Image: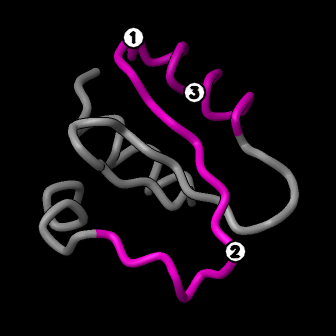
Amino acid sequence: MDKQQMLKLLIEKGYSAYIENHILMVRYFDQKSPLEEVKKILKENGYNASFGVQRSKSIAAYQPEEDEVAKAV
């Protein structure tokens, strides 16, 4: 799966996913990191490129670029 397909899949699975500087990113807002879950999804779908998981203090601070979201949908 390519980056755009993985972005779409992660969004469909309920993750706050986006692409930043050509890196697939997942942002989370609670105390538990989804790192292991995301790694498993990526591995199962054959995604071998770079990715990141980042904690955000508030959902209000999360503003993905509109064009990145539009590409995923």
Q: Secondary structure at mark 3?
A: helix
Q: What's the CA distance linking mark 3 and mark 1?
A: 11 Å
The crowding category of the residue bearing disc 1, from other C-alpha atoms within 10 Å (few below 14, some 14 to 19, many at least 20), is few
Q: Residue at x 50, y 23 (%)?
A: 42
State which tag comes first along the sequence, 2 or 3: 3
Magenta-colored span: 35-64
- The residue that disc 1 covers is 48
Q: Is residue 34 magenta?
A: no
In the rendering, at what x and y percent does residue 7 appear? 34, 44
Q: Are marks 3 and 1 in contact (CB under 8 Å)?
A: no
The crowding category of the residue bearing disc 2, from other C-alpha atoms within 10 Å (few below 14, some 14 to 19, many at least 20), is few
State which tag comes first along the sequence, 3 or 1: 3
Q: Secondary structure at mark 1?
A: loop
In the rendering, at what x and y percent does residue 53 appear? 58, 42
Q: What's the CA distance linking mark 2 and mark 3?
A: 24 Å
- The residue that disc 2 covers is 57
User: Farthest residue in the right direction?
Assistant: 31
Nearer the observer: mark 3 or 1; the answer is: 1
Q: Quadrant of the N terminus?
A: top left
Amino acid at pointer 1: Asn
The crowding category of the residue bearing disc 3, from other C-alpha atoms within 10 Å (few below 14, some 14 to 19, many at least 20), is some
Q: Residue at x 33, y 48 (%)?
A: 8
In the rendering, at what x and y percent does residue 12 appear? 45, 55
Q: Residue at x 24, y 65 (%)?
A: 69
Amino acid at pointer 3: Ile
Q: Residue at x 44, y 56 (%)?
A: 11
Nearer the observer: mark 2 or 1; the answer is: 2
Q: What's the CA distance linking mark 2 and mark 1?
A: 28 Å
Q: Are marks 2 and 1 in contact (CB under 8 Å)?
A: no
69 vs 44: above or below: below
Name the disc covering residue 41, or none: 3
In the rendering, at what x and y percent does residue 54 appear? 60, 50
